[in-house]
Amino acid sequence: MSQLQKQFGEIYDKYIEKIYRFVFLKVNSQEIAEDLTSEVFTRGWESFKKNKCDIKNLQAFLYQIARNLVVDHYRQKGQAQLVSTDALPLIDSSMGLEEKSMLKSDVNNVKAALANLNDDYREIIIWYYLDELSAPEIAKILGKSEEAVRVQIHRAINALRGVIK
Amino acid sequence: MTEKDLIKQLKELKAIKPGKDWVLLTKRQILPEEEIVGYSVSNIFHWKMAFAPVISLVVVIGLFGFASNTVPGDFLFPVKQVTETMEIGLSLTGEKSEVHLRLANKRLEELNGIAEANKVRSLSPTIKAFQDNITGALDGLSQMNSATLKGLVAETQKLEANKQKVESVLGVQIGGETEKLEKQLAGYLIADLENRTLDEQGQQLLAEAKESFEAGAYTLALEKLWFLSNK
């Protein structure tokens, strides 16, 4: 059992920030993002314990759980997936005030633009540009072909540019 | 804005991170044993290392305790054998025969118990062990001294009584060179007593013992000699 926990602990360490950021950018609430992210890994751990050998792509698996939880969250809330431009992202407390200020401004701009994209484009942008997943990796998450994903990436970034303009 | 600038700004969203405390706390909640495993296993390991000699000693003492009631053929009898072998090994040269005889008597007592419990498979190894003890006693006789003679005679007396009892219960002859043992012992005792100053009664008894010895009645000779030795 300890070996399994150790393995999942390493998985947790590797993906916690990515999953958290992914969820946060979709729900734009620290508290909700923490709750949902915690649930992602709790469910991930349960599945890992039972079916470790059956999980071929753990990253894709965790992202899928995250997507489903966000959908369920909004279904329960009866809310659209809106991102408030007033919300502040979490910033590393070790940053200087000026850095924090600049970052806040840029981040808010992009965040606001992301909020106006449809969910599919927003997800692809987060995965490709923030989490730096490759097209094949995104394809596995979405269950689509690599070619379809590359087309989607291109369309998503163009859509974001259109919003920022 | 160029695509390049947009991507650059997008990447700044990487600054969105969870709080470190929350990350740790959540990990502990999801994997509560991980820290314990990481921390306590090493501690438990150290504790185990510290207590290993004590635990081993307790196990060994326990083993010997359990083994003390075993008989030849039982699983733990080899443990008991180790104790007995050590007892022989640690005894003085002149005392080895007496130790062997004491163990031989033990085997006879065990044979009684085996007969009562009907532990048929233990019969043969116990009889063999008895015979080995008698051989061991015989081998050590030449090195015995007058101090151990009394003890030897006492054990031999017991031996004969026990042997007869066991043979009547089992209905078989146990064998072993007990007669040879008695003959040698009787011979030593006669030689020893002839060098002593005996009163009239003692001399009479010695003469009777010699007669029994000459007639091959070594058990009877030993009885008289044992009585003389203890006067």
Image (spheres, coloured by chain):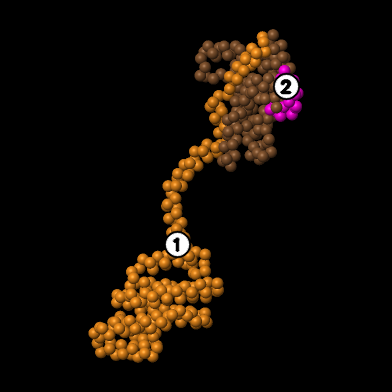
Which chain contains the residue that carries disc 2? A
Q: Please determine if labels 1 and 2 lie on a single subunit.
A: no
State which mark lies toward you, 1 or 2: 2
User: Picture coordinates of residue A94 (x, y %)?
Assistant: 51, 19
Label 1: how many Cα within 10 Å (few below 14, some 14–19, many 20+): some
Q: In the image, is residue A148 part of the stretch drawn in magenta? A: yes
User: Picture coordinates of residue B199 (x, y %)?
Assistant: 24, 87
Q: Which residues are magenta?
A: A137-154
What tint does the image give chain A? brown
Residue A62 appears in the picture as rendered: no
Q: Which residue is mark 1?
A: B64
Q: Which residue is mark 2?
A: A150
Quadrant in which residue A75 is drawn: top right
- How many numbered discs, if any? 2
Q: Residue at left 51%, top 14%? A: A96
Q: Amino acid at mark 1?
A: Phe
Q: In the image, is residue A152 part of the stretch drawn in magenta? A: yes
